[in-house]
């Protein structure tokens, strides 16, 4: 089958400067697909270029909440156009972030809403970033749900079980990254047990968030998704091969343009 790393920033210099090696190691580790995630218009363009050149790399296009104040109208015209590209399988990453104060919160909210609107238009799912804002996120999701069914994934999830359940009720997927493997993440592993198998995904969020046992080793890269996957399989009490099949089928269902 082969793992799908649903979230990697290959455009980041730490990975883009050694792309061949990174993809080679991913292949050796059994990673067969990955989504190269953008944070603004420029990285959306770069993600598409990488995805056009590499069979197993797919692109997302969109604007991260911490960059939302820098987005211009013309960037949105480009993003809307790119949603038709055959290698683009998602919108984002977008979402809300109250940890950093790079971008005023009302601008983040408007940016997030704009991604939802585009998702309803083009049917592509959102890759959602949530940091230190669970109640604000749930309020935004609940409001969006009044406009129609939601497609998307809570990426690198580190919220509470209650938040996960509310996101699941609205049809969203939950994706786990390296944080799941940390010793102190017992609560997160308990949350993982409550996520239905048909809504669970894995990712690295490379070059950030290296999993154990390579936590200090930077940068993180897609080959390391197997450590998070192994931890998740143990947590769920299922075989690693089964989890591979389950998460890859889930990824193909949510990111329907990915083959
Ligand atoms: Zn990311």
Image: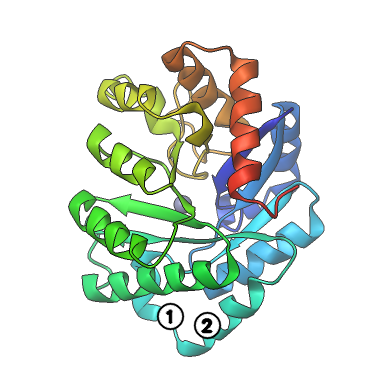
Is 209 drawn above or below residue 145 in the view shown? above
Is any part of residue 150 visible from this angle? yes
Q: CA distance from mark 1 to mark 2?
A: 6 Å
Other residues around mark 1 within 10 Å, as few (<14) / some (14–19) / many (≥20):
some
The numbered disc on residue 2 is: none
Which type of secondary structure does the marked residue at label 1 adopt?
loop
Camera-nearest residue between 233 and 185: 233
Camera-nearest residue between 189 and 11: 189
Camera-nearest residue between 73 and 84: 84
The residue at the point 52 percent across, 32 percent down is 198
Asked if residue 20 lies left or right of residue 135, the reply is right
The residue at the point 22 percent across, 58 percent down is 139
Is any part of residue 200 visible from this angle? no
Asked if residue 20 lies left or right of residue 105, the reply is right
Asked whether mark 1 lies closer than 8 Å to ligand 1, one says no
Is 117 drawn above or below residue 236 in the view shown? below
Asked which quadrant contains residue 215, the reply is top left
The residue at the point 66 percent across, 51 percent down is 256
Q: Position of residue 83 (x, y in %)?
A: 63, 71
Residues at badges 1 and 2 in contact (C-beta under 8 Å)? yes
Mark 2 lies on residue = 75
Q: Position of residue 24 (x, y in %)?
A: 76, 37
Mark 1 lies on residue = 71
Q: Position of residue 191 (x, y in %)?
A: 31, 27
Other residues around mark 2 within 10 Å, as few (<14) / some (14–19) / many (≥20):
some
Q: Position of residue 69 (x, y in %)?
A: 34, 78
Asked which quadrant contains residue 252, the reply is top right
Q: Seen from this angle, which residue lies furthest bottom?
A: 74
Asked if residue 51 lies left or right of residue 72, the reply is right
Which type of secondary structure does the marked residue at label 2 adopt?
helix
The residue at the point 58 percent across, 78 percent down is 80
């Amino acid at each position: 089958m082969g793992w799908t790393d649903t979230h990697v920033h290959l455009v980041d210099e730490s990975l883009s400067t050694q792309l061949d090696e990174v993809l080679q190691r991913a292949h050796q580790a059994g990673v067969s697909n990955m989504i190269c995630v953008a944070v603004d218009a420029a990285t959306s363009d770069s993600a598409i270029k990488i995805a056009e050149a590499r069979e197993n790399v797919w692109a997302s296009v969109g604007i991260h909440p911490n960059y939302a104040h820098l987005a211009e109208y013309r960037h949105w015209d480009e993003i809307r156009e790119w949603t038709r590209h055959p290698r683009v399988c998602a919108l984002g990453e977008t979402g809300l972030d109250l940890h950093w104060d790079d971008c005023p919160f009302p601008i983040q909210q408007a940016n997030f809403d704009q991604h939802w609107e585009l998702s309803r238009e083009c049917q592509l799912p959102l890759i959602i970033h949530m940091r230190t804002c669970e109640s604000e996120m749930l309020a935004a999701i609940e409001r969006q749900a009044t406009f129609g069914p939601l497609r998307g994934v809570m990426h690198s999830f580190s919220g509470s079980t209650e938040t996960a359940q509310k996101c699941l009720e609205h049809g969203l997927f939950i994706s786990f990254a390296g944080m799941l493997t940390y010793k102190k993440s017992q609560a997160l592993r308990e949350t993982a047990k409550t996520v239905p198998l048909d809504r669970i995904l894995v990712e690295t969020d490379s070059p950030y968030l290296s999993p154990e046992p390579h936590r200090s080793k930077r940068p993180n890269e897609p080959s390391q998704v197997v450590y998070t996957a192994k931890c998740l399989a143990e947590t769920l009490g299922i075989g690693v091969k089964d989890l591979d099949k389950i998460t890859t089928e889930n990824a193909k269902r949510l990111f329907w343009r990915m083959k």
